[in-house]
Amino acid sequence: MASLIRRVAKAMCEIAPLQLADSSWDNVGVLVESPEPNGSNVVVLTIDLTPRVMEECISNEAEVIVAYHPPIFTPMKRLTLDDPKQKIILQTVRCGASIFSPHTSLDAAKGGVNDWLASIVDKDGGVCPIQPCDWVEKLDSSGGSAREVGMGRVVSLSKCKTIEALVARVKKELNLPTVRVSLPNNWDKNTQVKSVAVCAGSGAGVFKKLKQQVDVLLCGEMGHHDVLAANACGRAVILCEHTNTERGYLRHSLQPLLQKKLGEGVRVVVSTSDEDPLVVW
């Protein structure tokens, strides 16, 4: 039987083909492969592989870590214990674990992070990508997938709602006590909304590719001047902090899907230590 990291990689590529990733800057796939797997058959899912999450993985004897954000992103010229990121890679190998990172392939995929985020806005609304993956025909000669995969999503609401109601829904579904909201000058809490563009994580770059007219931009984070520019174009902005727009996907979608693909002999768990680094005091 193939090693667990190879089975996980195969399953993850079925869920989110790596061809969908933005290879111009991203780093996806198997990033670390242990020469001596610990054989625990435990897979841990996390958004960020932080020192705290790494401690949890060691405690749970994780054999494979699926880290949404790639722990190896910029080139590493050495591996030493003095650097926290390098130390995590060394700890991974030492404990017999391997790392797989899907990142933007999972953003773009049908049923991936952005589709999940779109369902938070309106599970019955119409959905299409902001930036379709124009090379996806290589995966589906019929071209059907090309209309369903890509970066970001535009949600046409099944029923108009106020911006206040939309914000309340986002907070409830993402289990957040607060979000940051910026409204155009002529808006108030009762302004009606009929379309929302969503992008998990950092949204400004993807939102610049928008061709459709939308009322609201929803993402994890945007720069100050990008928010001002959106308001000037008559768009409201809802910011939930970067990983808060990603983390729920692990528990609600990826964990059960990956567990089903890997079978009963493997235990797939979501990290309990992984959390957004920013809190409101």
Image (spheres, helix red, strand yellow):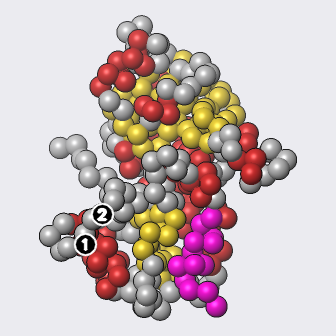
Q: Nearer the viewer, residue 199 or 208?
A: 208
**Which amino acid lies under the numbered mark 2 shown in the image of this protein?**
Met
Residue for badge 1: 79
Is residue 61 among the parts visible in the rendering?
A: no
Q: Which residues are magenta?
A: 1-13
Label of residue 23 in the image: none
Packing grade of label 1 (10 A; few <14, some 14-19, many >=20) is some
The quadrant where residue 153 appears? top right
**Most frequent secondary structure within the magenta stretch:** helix
Helix, strand or loop at disc 2? loop
Label of residue 76 in the image: 2
Q: Quadrant of the N terminus?
A: bottom right
> Is 47 above or below relative to 207?
below
Residue at position x 53%, y 79% in the image: 5
Residue 8 located within the stretch drawn in magenta: yes
Residue at position x 41%, y 60% in the image: 70
Q: Nearer the viewer, residue 105 or 121?
A: 105
Classify residue 14 as left or right of residue 57: right
Q: Are marks 1 and 2 in contact (CB under 8 Å)?
A: yes
Task: Spot the residue most to the top.
Answer: 186
